[in-house]
Image (cartoon, rainbow, N blue to C red):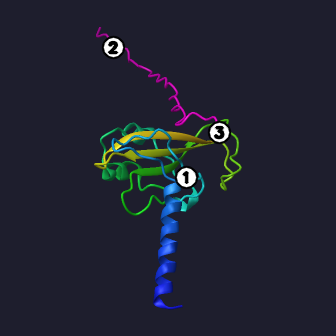
């Protein structure tokens, strides 16, 4: 192959890769919204060993419009999927939540029961501020994402008050 053929082949591969990447992304408007969020295949993660993470409810409570990519990186970590190189306006995560009573997800290689799995998408506006947040249930298919936080068991504290009788002088 000569240099010209190698260049054309490289350009073709690059164009195909860019088109494939565009096909899996949402159409994001300048204000950071989309009418139809597109989620990647759930277990096609690039990071975290194809497993996702277990966020805390406190971390999820911190998510709000106006956060920067750095803010979200500090709260949730890096996105779990390969988001592209230039002009990235959406980050995707795969989250797991402990939920007793849920069976085993046949697509999750861990084989652990009692876990609800959800995808989470953050979409940024043209100025790179977070504006929209979307959930997609993975397992079970009809799961509430995120599932309700477990209620803390009320704690009953019993204190025994011991008094010693006072001596009366005679």
The residue pinned by badge 2 equals 167
- Give the label, 2 or 1, closer to the camera: 1
Q: Which of 32 and 97 is in front in this view?
A: 32
**What residue appears at the point 41 percent right and 54 percent down from the top-left corner?**
77
Disc 1: which residue: 40
Residue holding disc 3: 141
- The majority secondary structure of the magenta stretch comes to loop
- C-alpha distance separating marks 3 and 2: 72 Å
* Residue located at (71% from left, 49% from top): 106
Given residues 121 and 72, the one toward you in this image is 121
* Residue 21 image point, x, y percent: 50, 60
- Upstream in the sequence, badge 1 or badge 3? 1
Residue at the limit of the structure toward the top, as seen here: 170
Mark 1 vs mark 3: give the one in front. 1
Q: Distance between the residues labelled 2 and 1?
A: 79 Å
Q: Can residue 46 be seen in this view?
A: no
Residue 73 position, x and y percent, is 37, 53
Q: Is residue 146 magenta?
A: yes
Question: What range of the chain is rendered magenta?
Answer: 141-170
């Amino acid at each position: 192959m000569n240099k010209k053929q190698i260049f054309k082949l490289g350009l073709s591969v690059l164009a195909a890769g860019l088109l494939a990447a565009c096909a899996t992304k949402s159409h994001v408007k300048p204000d950071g919204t989309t009418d139809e969020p597109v989620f990647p295949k759930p277990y096609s993660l690039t990071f975290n060993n194809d497993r996702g993470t277990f966020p805390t409810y406190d971390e999820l409570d911190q998510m709000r419009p106006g956060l920067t990519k750095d803010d979200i990186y500090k709260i949730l970590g890096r996105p779990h999927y390969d988001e592209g190189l230039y002009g990235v306006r959406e980050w995707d995560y795969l989250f797991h939540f402990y939920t007793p009573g849920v069976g085993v997800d046949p697509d999750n290689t861990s084989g652990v029961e009692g876990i609800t799995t959800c995808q989470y998408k953050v979409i940024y506006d043209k100025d790179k501020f977070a504006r929209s947040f979307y959930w997609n249930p993975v397992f079970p298919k009809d799961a509430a994402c995120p599932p309700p936080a477990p209620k803390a068991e009320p704690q009953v504290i019993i204190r025994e008050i011991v008094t010693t009788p006072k001596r009366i002088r005679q």
